[in-house]
Amino acid sequence: MSLSFKGHTVVITGGGGGLGKAYSLLFSAHGASVVVNDFNGEAAQKVVDEIVKAGGKAVVNTSSVTDGEAVIKTALDNFGQVTILINNAGFLRDKGFRNMVDKEWDQIMEVHVKGAFACTKAAWPHFRKQKFGRIINTASAAGLYGNFGQTNYSAAKMGLVGFTKTLAIEGAKYNIKANIICPMAASQMTATIMPPEMLANLKPEFVAPFVAVLANPNTLDITGRLFEVGAGFAAEVRLERSKGAIFKTDSSFTPSAVKAKWHEIVDFTDAEHPHLITDVDMQSKLRAAQNQSPNPQSSSDVRFDGKTVIVTGAGNGLGRQYSLMYGRLGANVVVNDVSEKGANAVVQEIVKAGGKAAAAICSAEDGEAIVKTALNKFGGVHVLVANAGILRDKSFQSMSEQEWDIVMAIHLRATYKCAKAVWPIFHKQQYGRILTTCSQTGIYGNFGQTNYATAKAGIIGLTKTLAFEGKKYNILSNVIAPSAGTAMTSTVWPQEWVDAFKPDYVAPVVGYLTSAQNEDISGLLFEISGGWAAQTRWQRSAGYGFPVKKSPTPEEALAKWDIITKFDERATYPTTTGESMAQIVGNFTNLGDAKAKL
């Protein structure tokens, strides 16, 4: 079967070199009209000239990817349509978290995330109208696993995973398919961080054929999926969730009870492989929790005497419950909220019960002001619980740029700003605990929540990198996806669900993870609701490696697709970029003299 793109128009951002150039040449060779977008007009023109010389059709676009309308307009003006979008543009601003400045964070978000949003937003109405569209978004192993010195890049790249999964859900009705690749390839970007001998084996031409398979209109019914590709090797990555532990939802559900059952939470025996947010029976788990005997406690109490805890978004819901719990367990609590009334009410509750608390009334984006309150009132800070959030749900077709921006700011950028503000203190005292808040929407995607899914997934990438950077200094960072009835969820949940999934039943897990009793759990993701807690991680198929003497054709890649996507006993569980790279590097020696490596 020959994979043809005749009659299709492909827009490729960052198309002037590296992967983008390889994509442009391959799609053109298979009959597509190509828009080569690159801020470097000279580089883009060279690619276009090469395509035209070979008899193909291509034009240059030099607009910023954040001006998605201008990028897509070039396709419409020159070819009358757009059918395939490959969001590939990007660059690096690597730096240790301690030394990173806001500009370096914001620049990466602007190009990688906002650029993908803007170009996809501009193409979306055309895709819907013609009932056809293919979107390939570019993530990275750094996004999936975290990577030292790349908090900004990790957050951006993992954010695109949540974005793509939600696009896949919203696009299903209109034959719009969206997938994610994590490519490992030589480019101007990777040339700054990889040795020449490694770059030689990581030709962009080894990635392009797999992208062609995912983008082809006539091949596979694949959407919302994630692949790692490089050096002729390709594998699928999916989610794996432990069965978890179920706790009785009464006063015996404490951080000490969580410690006592921790081994159950992280036991992956008979694990599940959820694909959608609905792939968990929450109500049955709640019933099981209600039927449990009182929870056994660990031999030593989990307490926070002498520790100062910051909780953002603490005026109600989850944040309020966290604050009350920390107050009961001896902590000094800094209650942050934009609502003066809400924050002060929680402070009064804590003080009335004999605890210590102070309000920090400001946006969670003002991390410095929140930390200043902690230092002024209590002389230190030991724990950050980044919980603040808002919803601005709307279908992607109807979502405004403002609705996108505000959710990204309050969820992702605020988490970055608060972590940035506590980091030098944690670093100096060689102690800190950070708990960030994701959502099942960020993990699985959810209709009408592209902004929220992107922000929440981004928090996963940020947290995993914080875990790597903080390990040496006893700074542990974890991320939770809670389901609880809050002011935020009451707008979208039926009332009986809101009542059943009390924030009280999330707080104990948060308490244990942020305590001194947690001495080594870091960089992990947990789903929590109604007395149930489970760990969620990545599982990667064994994949398939083509000989590296020449890049495979799209047709050859398609022929091995069943092997690439087969999950069996050979599946692996990478937790670092190094582990992710091992199989790709292992394919360097696959010269095809024997059977291609499985």
Image (cartoon, grey):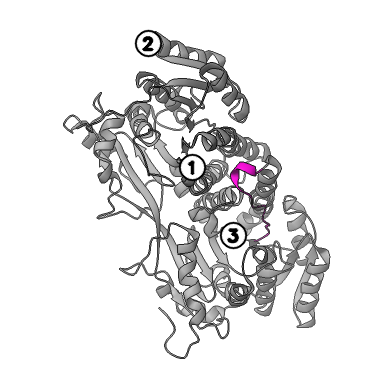
> Which quarter of the rendered picture does the C terminus lie within?
bottom left
Query: Secondary structure under badge 3?
Result: strand
Residue contact at pointers 1 and 3, CB within 8 angstroms: no
Nearer to us in this view, 291 or 419? 419
Toward the bottom, the furthest residue is 593
Q: Over which residues does the magenta segment extend?
A: 88-100
Residue on which the image places disc 2 = 354
Q: Main secondary structure of the magenta part?
A: loop
Total residue callouts: 3
Percent x, y for residue 340?
56, 15
Q: In terms of sequence position, does the residue under pointer 2 or pointer 3 come before the other?
A: 3
Q: Amino acid at mark 2?
A: Gly
Quadrant in the rendering for residue 85 = bottom right
Q: In terms of sequence position, does the residue under pointer 1 or pointer 3 come before the other?
A: 3
Q: Which mark is residue 473?
A: 1
Query: In the picture shown, does residue 244 fall above or below 402?
Result: below
- Whole-angstrom CA distance, mark 1 to mark 3, is 32 Å
Percent x, y for residue 161?
53, 53
Quadrant in the rendering for residue 13 = bottom right
- Whole-angstrom CA distance, mark 1 to mark 2, is 33 Å
Residue on which the image places disc 3 = 138
Instruction: Please tell me whether mark 2 or mark 3 is closer to you in this view.
Output: 2
- Whole-angstrom CA distance, mark 2 to mark 3, is 51 Å
Q: Is residue 430 left or right of residue 407?
A: left
Quadrant in the rendering for residue 102 = top right
Instruction: Please tell me whether mark 1 or mark 3 is closer to you in this view.
Output: 1
Q: In terms of sequence position, does the residue under pointer 1 or pointer 2 come before the other?
A: 2
What residue is at 45 percent from the left and 41 percent from the top?
A: 474
